[in-house]
Image (cartoon, rainbow, N blue to C red):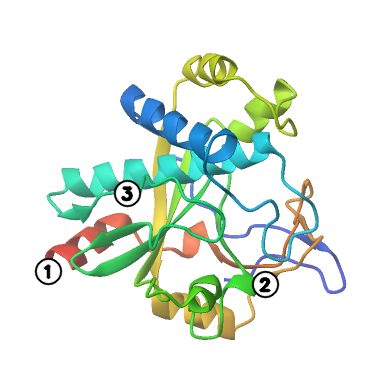
Amino acid sequence: MKLENAEGSNYYYVSHKKGFAGIPVPREAVQTVIDFAYEMCFGAGHHRNCRTGGQYERKGGEKFCNTFQGKLAEIVLYNYFKSEGLEVKEPDFGIYKEGIWDDSDLEIQGKKINVKSAASQSNLLLLETKDWNAQAQYIPNILLNNGSAVSYDYFILVRIEPDIKKLFKTDRLLFSNEISRKTIDEILFARTWNFDIAGYCTNADVITTIANNYILPQNAMLNQYTKMDACNYYIQSGDMKCIKDLVQELKAI
């Protein structure tokens, strides 16, 4: 389903939402992800400064927020699949230099899963248009040409509460390049963290989305308040399939 958009308007609105149903995140999972994200963003790791097709350079605080949210989504999804009795390849916690990144987010029974994270109020699975070709293949891995996965069997949207970027904005840390580990611990452990699995879609669903030109343009305004830094394909949460269905499908393999 397409976003609501009046002809000629730069404003887009979600039309098929799915309410957030929070599940508590264990404290040890938060601790593990803080360790990883801090090393990636303020230690020996590397995360690109700009989104593909993006317009501005990301500072350390924003890179930490993106890394924390993304890796936390992987861990809670990994734990969820394990609790359902599935054998899951563990998330990658390697600290990589520039030009190297992990192969795929999760893998079950040889099926590669791309995990997309968002804040709890979000209702879109977003894929940057310059990263994906018409066959829903991941262009950076094609260019890397080292055997990394270029296609994913499933795409899953995991939402996280609270919105870490809002927390960092409140403390004026989002655009900072120097943040102490103690400060981050104090901010993040002062909150209770929750997640939900908004849904999933298949590789075929993404190919259809790309073919149908479901695009949220660069500089578009989403839900009146969010300006898009890069051009993205989108799938609304209300159009995604229930995660329980995927569990049954994977168990049948």
| Residue 215: assigned label | 2
Residue 91 is tagged as 3
Which image quadrant: the C terminus?
Answer: bottom left
Q: Which residue is mark 1?
A: 252
Within 10 angstroms of label 2, few (less than 14), some, or many (20 or more) residues?
some
| 126 relative to 106 in the view: left or right | right
Corner quadrant of residue 108: bottom left
Task: Tell me the element at label 3.
Answer: loop
Amino acid type at circle 3 is Pro
Q: For marks 3 and 2, give the one nearer the viewer.
A: 3
Look at 86% across and 67% down and name the residue there: 9
Residue that appears at 37% across and 75% down: 147
Q: Quadrant of the N terminus?
A: bottom right
Query: Mark 2 and mark 1 in contact (Cβ < 8 Å)?
Result: no
Q: Taking 60 as reference, is 91 above or below it?
A: below
Mark nearer the N terminus (3 vs 1) = 3
